[in-house]
Structure formats: C-alpha cells, structure tokens
Amino acid sequence: MSRMPYQLPFPQGVANEIVVDAVVPEDERVWVPQMENVWFRPLCLNTVQGYWVNLLRVRKSGVLSRHRHPAPVHGVVLRGAWHYLEHDWKAKEGSYVFEPPGETHTLVVPENVPEMITLFHITGAMIYVDPFGHQTGYEDVFTKIDMCRAHYTASGLGAEYVDQFIR
Ligand SMILES: [Fe+2]
C-alpha cells in the first residue's frame, strides 16, 4: 500500500502541473530580452492569483532598476550577486531573499559580477519609480506574458511557446 499511487481522481478543474527540466535553458531563445544585457526566463505565469516566477539574468553592472513592491517577492540567487542601495546586506550565490510589501529599492549589480541569475517569485506588480517615488513604469503578469509572446514569435519558438508556463 505504501508504494501505491493515490487511487482517486483529482478534483474537477484542478490545473496541470508545470515541470521545467532545465531552469537555465540550453536554448538561448527562451530568454526574453528586457533591456540591453537583461533578460528573464518564465517559469510560472499565474493570471488567476496575479504572480509570476521567473529567472532574471543580468550581464552588466550598475543600477538595474528602482521599484516598489505592493505585494511580496521571494528570490533565490543562482549565480552572481547583487544588492539594494537601500540596504546593507548582499544577495550572493545561494542566498534567499524575502522582499516585503511596501519596499521600494534600487537594484545594483557590482562591477566584479559578469553575470547574475536570480529566481524571483513576484506577486502583483513591479512599479518602477524615480528616487522620489514618481512612477516611471510597471510590470505585471500580463505585461510579462505579452513580452514573452512577442519575443517567442520573433525568435521562431512561436507565440504559443509561453502557454506551457501560464496557469
Ligand atoms: Fe525588488
């Protein structure tokens, strides 16, 4: 009995699981360009709860973005390192970071880091702001999906490539 799979049907309407074999993909086209030398790689794009899980890859140093979070963010650093101008701590390879709602911070990748890759679980939105809090842009799960569709169309993977990550 202990090795027997669960014998009953799953509840009606249960979503399909997502399994990604290589979170850092071998196919470069999977990376969606965000700005020069910055890409993201979708893993889970949840349109019902309004969150997304992705890898952020940065191959440049300096200030990346200043943004406010209205909802929680979880991050795990897979490669490289980064920090926020507003805090003393450093996120290093292997670090886990919880960013509470209400944080506004400025992401910096130091000079000696040729590449950083961080897995972020972001709920709600990234609200981009200037140093005084005036909004300069925003992202949510829907803008991420739009960017994926546009890039996967242009790169030849096809717009529907993103569908496997959407729930
Ligand atoms: Fe953040």
Image (cartoon, helix red, strand yellow):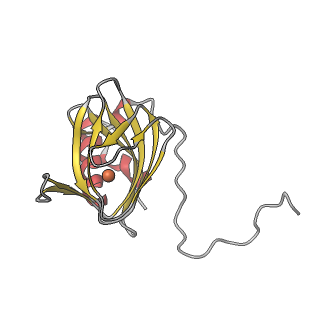
Identify the residue at horizontal 35%, vertical 36% (top origin): 57
Q: In the picture, which quadrant includes the C terminus?
A: bottom left
- Residue situated furthest front in the rendering: 88
Residue 46 in view, yes or no: no
Percent x, y for residue 108?
A: 27, 38
Percent x, y for residue 32?
A: 30, 40
Q: Nearer the viewer, residue 72 or 133?
A: 133
Horizontal side, residue 110 vs residue 10: left or right: left
Q: Quadrant of residue 158?
A: top left
Residue 130 in view, yes or no: yes
Identify the residue at horizontal 21%, vertical 49% (top origin): 66
Q: Quadrant of residue 28?
A: top left
Q: Nearer the viewer, residue 33 or 67?
A: 67
Q: Is residue 105 above or below residue 118?
A: below
Q: Nearer the viewer, residue 30 or 154?
A: 30
Percent x, y for residue 36?
A: 20, 33
Percent x, y for residue 62?
A: 23, 33
- Residue situated furthest right in the rendering: 1
